[in-house]
Amino acid sequence: MKRVLISFAALALVAGCGVRPTEVLDGGAPASGIPEGMRIYFASDQGLRGVSRPGNEVTSLEAVVKLLMAGPNEAELAAGLADLTAITGEFSATAAEGQVTVRLPRTPVGGVAGMAAGQLVCSLARAESLLHGTRPDAVRVTVVAQGGTVGPYQCSQFLAG
């Protein structure tokens, strides 16, 4: 029995495994933590989803709120994304040392609750990161709306784990 096993092992070594050598293949660029460019967040059945807005340069926090208010494009709507925010009228957004404050004087506080708050918080955290180099996980967003204040929130509070 030992001879049969030894003979079989020797035969396997001589035959090889059938894999032929190849040239070195380039695996591409290494994975990076945060995709480049602006991302805004919309609601879906699975929670918040960030979508790229590569053609939009981030110049201010207000510009990001306007992007969010414009809603998902046709492809994003077809993929089941929705804007749950109910931002109406004027608004302003300021930042200092990673603390973002959004003022929505004509928007009821209920219009920025739950996943709608997450859309706003995550979109603004991304913008603050691009504008001032603050780590997105260090950004805190407070929303001052008609009828109350919510936050400060971090984006991670709204993203499914």
Image (tube, rainbow, N blue to C red):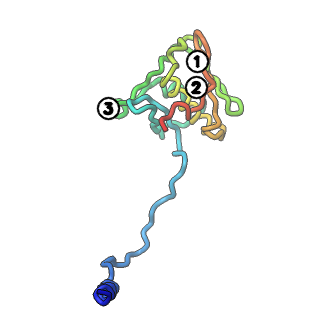
As shown in the figure, which amino acid type bears the numbered disc 3? Answer: Ala
The Cα–Cα distance between marks 2 and 1, rounded to whole angstroms, is: 8 Å
Residue nearer the viewer, 55 or 157: 157
As shown in the figure, which amino acid type bears the numbered disc 2? Answer: Glu
Q: Position of residue 119 (x, y in %)?
A: 50, 28
Q: Determine if residue 81 is in view.
A: yes
Task: Give the mark nearer the N terminus: 2 vs 1.
Answer: 2
Q: How many marks?
A: 3
Q: Nearer the viewer, mark 3 or mark 2?
A: 3
The residue lying furthest to the front in this view is: 1
Task: Give the mark nearer the N terminus: 1 vs 3.
Answer: 3
**Marks 2 and 1: CB-CB under 8 Å?**
yes
Q: Give the labeled residue for mark 1.
A: 91
Q: Residues within 10 Å of mark 3 (few under 14, many from 20)?
A: few
Q: Give the labeled residue for mark 3.
A: 78
As shown in the figure, which amino acid type bears the numbered disc 1? Answer: Phe
Q: Determine if residue 93 is in view.
A: no
**In percent of the image, x 52 and y 19: which residue is there?**
112
The Cα–Cα distance between marks 1 and 3, rounded to whole angstroms, is: 29 Å
Q: Position of residue 104 (x, y in %)?
A: 58, 16
Q: Relative to residue 83, is residue 108 depicted above or below?
A: above
The quarter of the image holding the N terminus is bottom left
Q: Nearer the viewer, mark 1 or mark 3?
A: 3
**In percent of the image, x 33 and y 76: which residue is there?**
19
Q: Residues within 10 Å of mark 1 (few under 14, many from 20)?
A: some
For residue 78, side relative to residue 49 (left or right) = left
Q: Secondary structure at mark 3?
A: helix
Residue nearer the viewer, 20 or 93: 20
For residue 80, side relative to residue 101 (left or right) = left
The residue lying furthest to the right in this view is: 97
Q: Give the labeled residue for mark 2.
A: 62
